Image (cartoon, grey):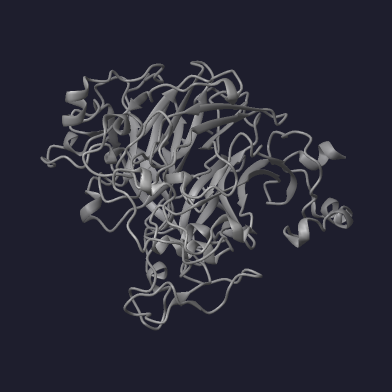
Amino acid sequence: MKKLLCTAGVLSLALAMAFAGRVKADNDRYNFFDFGGEFHGFQPGNLVLSRSVYVNNPNFVKVGEVLPPGCATTSVGCTPPDMATFDGTYPYVFNNDAVDGSFGVTSPLFLDQLTPFGWRIDTLPVPTDQLVTSFSSKSEGALNLSTDKKYLTFIDYVAQVGTVDASNGNTPGVVDPTNPVGEAFYRAVAKVDNDGHFDFTETNAYSGNNGRAAIYNKDGDVYYTVGNAGNGNNPQPAGILLAAGMQIMTPAHKPESKQNPGTPTPVASFNITEIPANTKADKLGKDDNFRGLTIFDNVIYATKGSGSNGIDTVYFVDTAGTACPKGVGVPVPGATLPTAPITVPPTSTLLLTGLPNNMCVLSGFNTVLAKTSTQPFPFGLWFADANTLYVADEGNGNIGTLSAGNAYADASAQTTAGLQKWTYNSTTKTWSLQYVLAAGLGLGEPYTVPGYPTGVNPNSTNKLFPNGLPWAPATDGLRNITGRVNWDGTVTIWAITSTISGGGDQGADPNRLVMITDGLSATGPNPPPDESFTTLRTAQFAEVFRGISFTPGTGADDDHGKGR
């Protein structure tokens, strides 16, 4: 019966009802159709949801303590009155973000095995003595299957639960003295197989910021990762430039206690000056502030959708070296995945011009600089086939700037937030946006979370809302996604929502797991009228959802590197 429960697509409503007596668990955290059994391994065809629960301990932060931690040991020192105004109680603790722009608290990470309908089968906790995540770093926690589909990978921090500001701390081997966070923690890639066995590989990459996603290339025995680095002054040290963007690393194959990570090894980089219209470079390293990551047909793709530097768009790594002489193009047929880092220039050259550039903007996607653009904000991406690409747009994050009568009007007014469908024209060699799927997401519609504060947060105000912005979260767009092609010519996509609210940090808002089915051959400019998102799960008090993927072993018989 256990095997029957774990096999995708065979769990009928009648079977769910038969097990209803087993369902009530975890203090009503999960819905009626959850089974909550002991973890016995991932089964192909199910989903995995990465989830974090804040350990609601008031002692994690004490009112009056100086923030960021260890600032007195840095070259920039502490700047009173930057002291905690709230203790560690959720969600009020995140109001400390107003006095500490680096604020966050580490928390445990859990991997929930779900049916495709969102019903929880069991949960695999990530061992907190090996890896934790940061509450409320919303760009973390992405899950990806390896190129052979046998492993699940993600990246987070080597720190204790309850550590303040680990997400903006340095790494031990790449210390920026101008980073106001005077702490250092390794980041680490986690790899887990279908039996729930973990391997961890520590790295000095992403010093001052966070790693966002990782994929294991089985054929090359390497990880590709994306993220951001730097939390200090400009110009950034050479180590920070090396620690940013897209990295390549070899699995450690030994316990964390015996690892000694070396210098970060970047595998790809982009600079806005690759596009001829941009004659002036940005702050070095910040064009590589990547978030989404996928591999399709032996090509690595990444997205950038935040920060004031660079271009918020979809990129790919050009291993052929001929795909984009002017910074924009499409992959060369027969391209191969990289197996070694890019050649790093001497420090004097690195500090002057940055890393060598071997990435391109995917033709048809945005090329307008982030500092002058109000959209898009791409995050996760998934290829249904060689000619169909779905891109999640998380929205602009604005609240209370359009209407004094409706704090959520910003999200409701968006036209590109949600799930974008792009198709490829092989004649023009460019991608075109067909439509944006947003029906059923409830963009800008606040929802209630049991136990969460109601009314307004007086510590979160603006000109239109001088008394405070509302605590209640509302969906603003989508972040990480995964999908599958169905036998009937449709595709189904699962996605994690982004939120807006008047909370101290919107990344701490309880968000949602949603699902939609789209006609693969459908084209724009408008989406099919009968297609709408369904909410499968809503995070509860002190809980957030981060990544979504299929289980290890799903699609293992497919061609490697196809990314499906």
Q: On the rendered structure, is 177 left or right of 513?
A: left
> Which residue is depicted at the point 37% across and 48% down?
72
For this rendering, which residue is in front, 131 or 227? 131
Q: Residue furthest front?
A: 72
Quarter containing the N terminus: top right
Residue 553 visible to the viewer: yes
Quadrant hosting residue 128 = top right
For this rendering, which residue is in front, 94 or 64? 64
Q: Could you say where residue 480 lies in the image, as x and y percent from the top left?
A: 50, 46
> Which residue is depicted at the point 16% across and 39% down?
281
Quadrant hosting residue 143 = top right
Q: On the rendered structure, is 110 left or right of 276?
A: right
The total number of labels drawn is: 0
Is 43 above or below relative to 51? above
Is 96 above or below relative to 546? below
> Which residue is depicted at the point 73% across and 57% down?
30
Q: Could you say where residue 520 lies in the image, as x and y percent from the top left?
A: 50, 45
Is 454 above or below relative to 275? below
Q: Could you say where residue 392 lies in the image, as x and y percent from the top left?
A: 44, 50
Q: Could you say where residue 10 lies in the image, as x and y percent from the top left?
A: 77, 43
For this rendering, which residue is in front, 93 or 127? 93
Quarter containing the C terminus: top right
Is 311 above or below relative to 145? below
Q: On the rendered structure, is 335 left or right of 136?
A: left
Q: On the rendered structure, is 206 left or right of 215?
A: left
Residue 440 visible to the viewer: no
